[in-house]
Amino acid sequence: MRFRNLVATAALAAALAGCTNETLDSVNLSSVKSKTNYQLSSKITAKMSELGMQKTSPIALRIFKEEGTLEVWKANTANRFQLLKSYKICAWSGKLGPKVKEGDRQAPEGFYPLFPHQMNPNSNYYLAINTGFPNTYDKANGRSGTHLMIHGACSSSGCYSMTDEQIIEIFALARDAFKGGQQSVQLQAFPFRMTAENMARHRDNPNIEFWKMLKTGYDQFEVTKRPPEVNVCERKYIFNQQSDGTFNPMGQCPAMSTPPALQVAMTSFEKDYQRNYDKALKKYEGMVWYEPTEAERKAIVADQRKGRELAYAPTGTSLDAGKMMKVSDLEKKLADEKAAEEAKQAALIQREALEKATRGGASVPLPQASPIERPVLQAAIQPAPARKSFWNLFSASQPEAAAPAPTVQAPEQPAATQSAAPQQQPAAAGQQQAPAPADSNAQVAAAPAENPQAAAEQSAAEQPKKRPFWKIWGN
């Protein structure tokens, strides 16, 4: 009996643990008749009961880019939020850091209120929840962008994209919370979990001051387990501050004070944090975190796209693709990447210039020839051996025709001059001769003979006598 109880207890624990892993609690979309009216599974509702949560109690969403995680937190009967379920984000674009302008492919970071009208049941990406970017802080800092969503389809160009099975659950959790009277769901989007070690690891990132500001809200949620009250003044986030004045995003902050209980709790928290931060600094001394590009993140999960639609584009996590490096090694890596990018841009500019020059079928422009005419010496090319005639095949005594000797080509003469002097004349007495080729035969052919008649007789004597046609078969 005791053994059975242990087995039953272990099975129940495994079932409840499965509620935090979407791979063990996936939705069968083929059985869903209405995606907007989808009812949460019995596993999730059982988890709610265990944690003392009502089906319609408020929720909060937390996103951690670096590890690619979206968490759903839900209020219990004491109005303290607890983690209900964690989802693996399928795709997010860009790198760590806030979205600044339209087209930068960055996913937002900050605190965003989600209202019922931001729920889109007719999204092209199955279901979507608009993040509300740009919020009050973003507008005060001149940041721009539109249609930044949490949606399905696992494809992102600035959004946080889930699978369709994931977004239908997230959508249902938000829908039920709004039905319970929640005015807005707070979305907290962070680059990473803002622990002492992570903050030390990213201390050299150019966004570190922005992240330190977000960390105040992050810490207060960690301590109170309640979404912080958010305001904006002097173009910065303000969390859980009491004031009789008004908060002007662009203007000076009014007189503010932190609630006493929160101040005591945060003082103790910050003391522990600083001790851990100093310890982490020693651990990472001389080291710096290399933040991977989106392409590098995609490369480590490329096999996940096999057999799926082209739109399915998981991007992987920065923790898997990034790494700690020595400062000198990172500087060299960044210099090499910069040089490669500059070479790529130079090649692109050259190609565009070539396309422009040849537009409309124009030929490729070539360098103009030099206006100064110079003699051109043709290289001595050995011609192929002369083929014997049909009749010579039967003659054993007749030698093969000698290959023509290379000659020096003189500069082209005007047409009138060529017609007037078709044959080369012997050089005048005392006139300088051109250098003779190295080949003796070429020397004979190139230099004119001093006595033409003697030269003709000598040439005739050197040629073998041809046999008459009728004596080919004779002895």
Image (cartoon, helix red, strand yellow):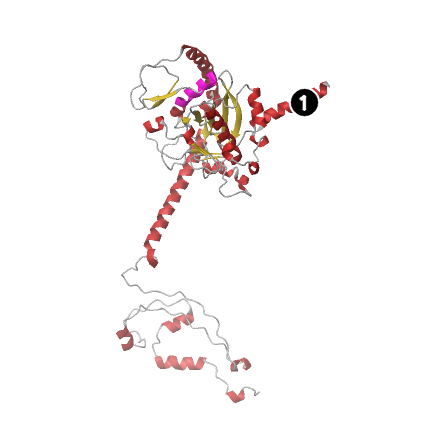
In the figure, is residue 187 to the left or right of 42?
left
- Residue located 43% across and 28% down the image: 116
Is 299 positioned to the left or the right of 448 in the image?
A: right
Residue 90 place in picture, x, y as percent: 50, 34
Magenta span main SS? helix
Residues 44 and 375: in front is 44
- Give residue 341's position: percent from left, percent from top: 40, 41
Q: Where are the magenta residues, as a range?
A: 212-226
Q: Can residue 13 be seen in this view?
A: yes
Q: In this view, does 378 lie above or below 76?
A: below
**Amino acid type at mark 1:** Ala
User: Would residue 285 be seen by someone viewing this image from the given angle?
Assistant: no
Looking at the rendering, which quadrant does residue 288 occupy? top left
Within 10 Å of disc 1 (Cα), the crowding (few <14, some 14-19, many 20+) is: few
For the N terminus, the image quarter is top right
Rendered location of residue 5, percent (x, y): 69, 20
The reply to whether the magenta stretch includes residue 223 is: yes
Task: Please provide percent x and percent y for residue 230.
Answer: 39, 21
Q: Mark 1 points at which residue?
A: 8
Describe the element under mark 1 as helix, strand or loop.
Answer: helix
